[in-house]
Image: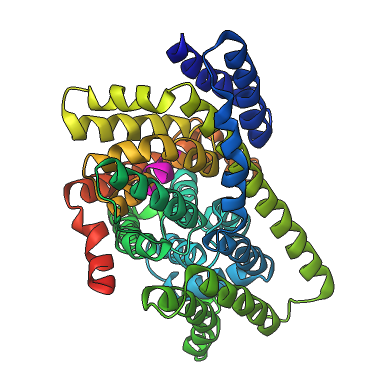
Amino acid sequence: MEEYMALGLFLTVCLFLLAGYPVAFTLAGTALGFAFLGEWNGTFDPSFLELLPNRLYGIMTNETLLAVPLFVFMGVMLERSKVAESLLDTMAALFGRLRGGLGISVTVVGMLLAASTGIVGATVVTMGLLSLPTMIKRGYDPGLACGTICASGTLGQIIPPSIILVLLGDVLGSAYQEAQLEMGIFSPEAISVGDLFAGALLPGLLLVAFYIVYLLIVAWLKPQAAPAVPAAELGIDEHLLLRVAKVLVPPLVLIVAVLGSILGGLATPTEAASVGAVGAIVLALSQRQLNLGLLREVMRDTTRITSMVFLIFIGASLFSLVFRGFGGDDQVADALTGLPGGTFAAVLAVMAVMFFLGFVLDFIEITFVVVPVVGPILLAMGLDPIWLGVMIALNLQTSFLTPPFGFALFYLRGVAPPEVTTGQIYRGVIPFILIQLLGLGAVALWPQLATWLPKLIYD
């Protein structure tokens, strides 16, 4: 009976989420309902719920999670201060004379925004509003333009300082310590958000390189799909390099200050996030965009997003306790360890489940609900936690791009011009999905892509 209760709890949560109910309240409400039902039929020990105050206190006092509102503030401030618009104009002037140059510009700006904001939805919407009409006007194939924008917009999932990496680093850190204790290691090693940032850097840059190579190949084989822009229409003059430096240097300085301080061991992610938040304010001042109204909007959006994240965290903590109270974690462990093929099959099964869950759940829900359950099991099999975290981030990024439910596709569809069809958007992202799978396969075959840099820096 107990195993059916755990399965029923999970399926009921999925059903309510598919029906559109708020995630945090669905997790908490369904878990409480099943806890009362389990206590009534004798399959649940209510003492599990007594652990909830300790869980909540741990969330409240977790210094790493303080980086979330600070990185959100940094991202929203940069989004509202028209940094993306200036970058796109300047990069288009720099690369536009090449075939596929506008696509390369969008990819480079997407990479810079990913390293500056880490907010996927905001990046896709901003890039869609600013660059899609221009690319179509210049004769770009609509599918290629849409695919480039969606793919470059999701780089915020994998290129640090990504919010998903902050959350994954915290959750995987706890899962890694739990796995080591289960393995009889009573002085467990720890991993940090900085480790995950370092691990994700090379795979993220590898994806950017793959995107650019693909755009160059398309421009070479099909010049009409990605034409060059005449120099006279780009506003190129003798001051171009000065414009590039003026627009490009401030965001790069901010990125280096944030990432460099973390990777160099000079600051914790929370301290670096505070540097980023202040730097975003300075950058908005330099763009002459900062005023009281803008600051009020940024603070409101930051509060709303942060509240959503922590409410989901609380709901997920309650769900996790009840799920474990029904023995759900043991059932998952038995299922994964009993698969023919051992560790490889277990990782493949978890990645497949996360991929399909990425169609209906945001990365925050998956990080807080699924990773705490499967993370300790996979890590107890001897997997490297940094490699596993990078694989999860890449997998979710791919899921966000995949038709028909990918979140990035919905974001772009909402701001695309009427003449761009949904079919064109879906067609355009397919080559980029294949590139994502290539990147995922590369990290799976050569774990050093994710583990070499953290070892070099921290060992």
Q: Going 24% across and 27% down the picture, which residue do you hit?
A: 337
Q: Compared with residue 89, is residue 123 higher up or lower down, i.e. above or below?
A: above
Q: Going 43% across and 29% down the picture, which residue do you hit?
A: 356
- Which percent across, then down, holds residue 23? 63, 34
Residue 171 is a magenta residue:
no
Prevailing SS of the magenta stretch: helix
Please indicate whether residue 113 sits to the left or right of residue 453 in the image.
Answer: right
Task: Name the image quarter holding the C terminus.
Answer: bottom left
Q: Say if residue 101 shows up in the picture.
A: yes
Query: Which one is nearer the viewer's eye here, 189 or 19?
Result: 189
Say how the picture is coloured.
rainbow
Q: Compared with residue 240, is residue 99 higher up or lower down, i.e. above or below?
A: above
Q: Going 37% across and 35% down the picture, which residue do you hit?
A: 374
Please indicate whether residue 222 sits to the left or right of residue 75 in the image.
Answer: left
- Which percent across, then down, holds residue 278? 63, 78
Q: Quadrant of residue 379?
A: top left
Q: Say if residue 140 shows up in the picture.
A: no
Query: Which one is nearer the viewer's eye here, 429 or 371?
Result: 371
Q: Compared with residue 325, is residue 133 higher up or lower down, i.e. above or below?
A: below
Give the magenta-colored segment's residue range: 393-399
Q: Going 63% across and 48% down the picture, which residue do you hit?
A: 310
